[in-house]
Amino acid sequence: MLSGTVQSSKDLVNDLEYRGLIHQLTDTENLRKKLESERVTLYCGFDPTADSLHIGSLLPILCLRRFQLAGHIPLALVGGGTGLIGDPSGRSSERSLNTADTVASWTNSLKAQLSAFLDFNLEGNPAKLVSNYDWIAPLDVITFLRDIGKNFTVNYMLAKDSVDSRLSNGISFTEFSYMILQAYDFYKLNQEHNCSLQVGGSDQWGNITAGLELIGKMGGGDAYGMTMPLVTKSDGKKFGKSETGAIWLDRNKTSVYQFYQFWINTDDNDVVKFLKYFTFLSQAEIEALENELKQQPERRVAQRELAREVTKIVHGEEAVVTAEKITQALFSGEFMSLSEAELVEALQDMPTTVCTGEEDRSLINLMIEVGAAPSRRQARQDIESGAVSVNGQKLTNGETVLGPDQKLCGKYIVLRRGKKNYFLARFE
Ligand SMILES: N[C@@H](Cc1ccc(O)cc1)C(=O)O
C-alpha cells in the first residue's frame, strides 16, 4: 500500500533539504543526529475545518510518510478538540464556529482520509492516528488555567505573529487561547507517545514553538519543531485553487479527472519544484525530467509524470488509468470508449443543456438549443465547413437527425464546435 523507496535515516534530512521541504527547524544538527541514531516519533495535526482535506495538506501528509519510509513513527492528529476553537494562524479575521456535531463528523472524515496515506501495520514503526478531542474535551477550566496556562505569559502570547497580526482588528479570547491547546497536544504526545518532533506548514511555527516552550517548562523530553514552506506559484496566484475552487482530496468533491488536470496544468516554472514536493521520485528521476523539460518543454513529460505520481499517491493506480482515459477522450473527441461513470466525469465541466421531450432533433436544431450557434445560418455554415462533431464524429449535413443511436449511455450527446468548444445535451 505504501509506495516510495525506503530511505535510511541518514539520507532523510538530506532528502528533505534537496526537496526544499525544510522552512524552519529548531535545531538541525541535533535532530539530524537523533534521526540517525534512533527511531523518532513525530506528529502533524490537521483541524477539521471542512468535510475533506485539500491539497494544501498534502505537503505535511507526505512529510509524515517520508519519515515513516525512513523508519520513524508518524502520528497523524485530527483536531477534534482544536477544531472546536479555531486556529488564528495565517488568518486575518475571526473564524465562525461550527457546531459540535459538524466538527465530530468532519473529524471522522479526516481520520478516514489520513489513514490512507500511512501504514498502520508496518512492523516496527506503525503509524498512529489520534484526535485531540480525547484529552481536550475532559480538561476542566481550573486545570487548564492553573497547570497549563500558568506556563505562558500573555506577553509571550501577544508576540506571536498569529496574535500580533490580529490585534488591530481584534481577536477573541477563544482564538487567542488556541496556541495553548496545540502546545498541550505536543506535551501530551511527548509524554504518552514519546513524540519528539512536530511538523507543520510555515504558519504553524508559533504554535509549534509554544509546544516546545511548554514541554521545556513541564519537564518533558527533548523535542524539535520543523515547518515546511508555503507552496507558491511563479504566476503569483494562490496554490491549490482552480477556477472551480479548492482542489480536495475527496474524489466526490474533486473528481479524479479534475485532480489529474490540476497537476498536468502546472507551469514549466513550477513543475520541478512540485515534483520535489509532491512525489517520491528520486533525485536522479527528477533531474532526468528537468532535463527533458529543458530539451522539449512542449511534450510536457514532467507535468504528465507529476500528474500521474500525485494522482497515484492520493487516489491509486486505477485512478491514473481513468484520468488518462478521460483526458484522451476529451483530446480526441471520442467518448465511445468511456463507461457511464467516466463519461459523467469527463463531461461535468461542460456547459450542459437539459433537453426535454421525446422527439429527435436535427443537428442544426440541437446546435441552437444548446447555444452552440447564435443562428441557423451560422450553425449551417459551421457544420458545412466541417467544424462540428457529434460524439467525436464530424457531421457535415445539418439536417442529420440525432436519435437514440446517437445518445451516449442513452442520454448524452456531446457537440463540439471548433477545437475546444464543447456543449453537452442531456436528455431527460
Ligand atoms: N493548528 C493546526 C492543526 C493542529 C491542531 C492540533 C495540533 O496539536 C497540531 C496542529 C492547523 O490549523 O493547521
Image: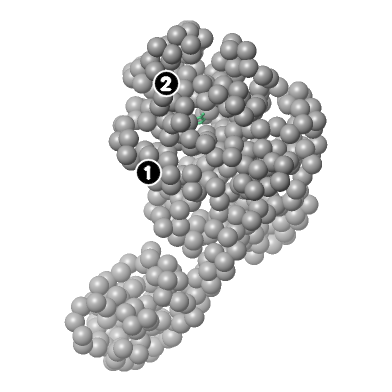
Residue 66 vs residue 263: left or right? right
Residue 223 placement: quadrant: top right
Q: Which part of the image, by quadrant, shows the N terminus?
A: bottom right
Q: Quadrant of residue 211?
A: top right
Residue 328 left/right relative to 50 = right
Q: With respect to residue 7, does 339 lie above or below?
A: below
Left or right? Give the position of 212 relative to 107.
right
- Residue 239 spot, x, y in % from top left: 50, 44
Residue at 38% from the left image edge and 22% from the top image edge:
175
Q: Position of residue 400 (x, y in %)?
A: 31, 92
Q: Is mark 2 within 8 Å of ligand 1?
A: no
- Residue named by callout 2: 139
Q: Disc count in the image? A: 2
Disc 2 vs disc 1: Cβ atoms closer than 8 Å?
no
> Which of 193 and 289 lies nearest the eye of the viewer?
193
Residue 171 is situated, as x and y percent measured from the top left of the image, at 35, 19
The circle drawn on residue 105 is 1
The three-letter amino acid code for the residue at tag 2 is Leu
Query: Is disc 2 placed on a helix, strand or loop?
Result: loop
**Residue 161 appearing in the image:** no
Q: Secondary structure at mark 1?
A: helix
The amino acid pointed to by label 1 is: Ser
Quadrant placement of the C terminus: bottom left
Q: Nearer the viewer, residue 360 or 51?
A: 51
- State whether residue 229 is above or below residue 123: above
Sequence order check, earlier mark of 2 and 1: 1
In the shown orientation, is residue 143 left or right of residue 288? left
Can the viewer see residue 352 in this picture? yes
Q: Please name the residue shown 51% across and 42% down the image.
A: 56
